[in-house]
Image (spheres, grey):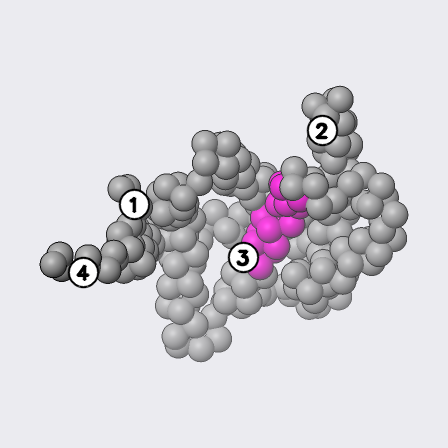
Amino acid sequence: MSEPAAPETAEPESGELTFVEHLEELRKRLFIAALAIAIGTGVCYAFIDEIVKVLERPAGDLDFIYISPPELFVTYVRVAVIGGLVLASPVVLFQLWRFVEPALRRRERRQLLFALLMGVVFFSVGVAFAYSVVLPIAIEFFAVRLAGEGILPTFSISYYIGFVSSTLLAFGIVFQLPLFVLLLASLGLVTPAFLRRYRKIVVLAIVLLSAFLTPPDVISQLLLAGPIMLLYELSVLITVVITRKKVRAAE
């Protein structure tokens, strides 16, 4: 009499990772990313004086003070951490890419790689625009035009760095709008007619978003809202091009 066959166990297919192996892979990628950020932070702190001088450049000849004993040190550490994130961003993005790449098809890999690269490009353009155009205009307005007679514009270094970093980050984020709309249009979730129909609502949302992301002043909000509206119109053109390509492919 033959023995009953042993129940079959679910074996992972060749090349596929188990759940535990996925967790181990994620832990490895996170460790490499955290190590890169730590090294980048250390490098930035070693050159903190040069970095702070670059951040102070849009302020021109204005003087800075610090009003509590640990303020300058805390500000330097914050600048070093932000700089470390910027330096480590290629390593962090590469680790993200390596983690999700095995689960993607060839076309999806190309699309994700394109999105990551263009995200870096748009973010860099937004930061460069804010640094070279927006910050000098905003500081000129607040430090020169609003200064009354006998009132000297002397800024706290921590408040100034906070103002600069939040402005650069806000512009870097909002300049991702065309890329975000491009992805939605590629998935068929938005159309040119949809974007045109809700243009008024989007303009209102842009104004509210600018008020939320920028420091509490009208000049920074207007300088952020204007480029976002231009980017939105660019996004409409992008969806028109993508929609036409889809129609031609379907025909």
Q: From the viewer's perspective, is the residue at label 3 or at label 4 nearer? A: 4
Q: Mark 2 highlights which residue?
A: 246
What amino acid is at disc 3?
Answer: Ser
Disc 3 vs disc 2: Cβ atoms closer than 8 Å? no
Q: Mark 3 highlights which residue?
A: 165
Q: Mark 1 highlights which residue?
A: 13
User: What's the CA distance linking mark 1 and mark 4?
Assistant: 25 Å
User: What's the CA distance linking mark 2 and mark 1?
Assistant: 36 Å
In the rendered image, the quadrant that contains the N terminus is: bottom left
Residue 33, given in percent of the width and then of the height, sits at: 32, 52
Disc 3 vs disc 1: Cβ atoms closer than 8 Å? no
Q: How many marks?
A: 4
Query: Residue at point 37% right, 63% down?
Result: 77
Q: Judge the density around disc 4: few (<14), some (14-19), many (≥20) Cα neighbours within 10 Å.
A: few
Disc 1 vs disc 4: Cβ atoms closer than 8 Å? no
Dot 2: what SS?
helix
* Residue 128 appears in view: no
Residue 4 disc label: 4
Residue 94, given in percent of the width and then of the height, sits at: 37, 42
User: What's the CA distance linking mark 3 and mark 1?
Assistant: 48 Å
Query: Residue at point 52% right, 60% down?
Result: 161
Q: What is the span of residues highlighted in magenta in the rendered image?
A: 165-184
What amino acid is at disc 1?
Answer: Glu
81 or 14, which lies in front? Answer: 14
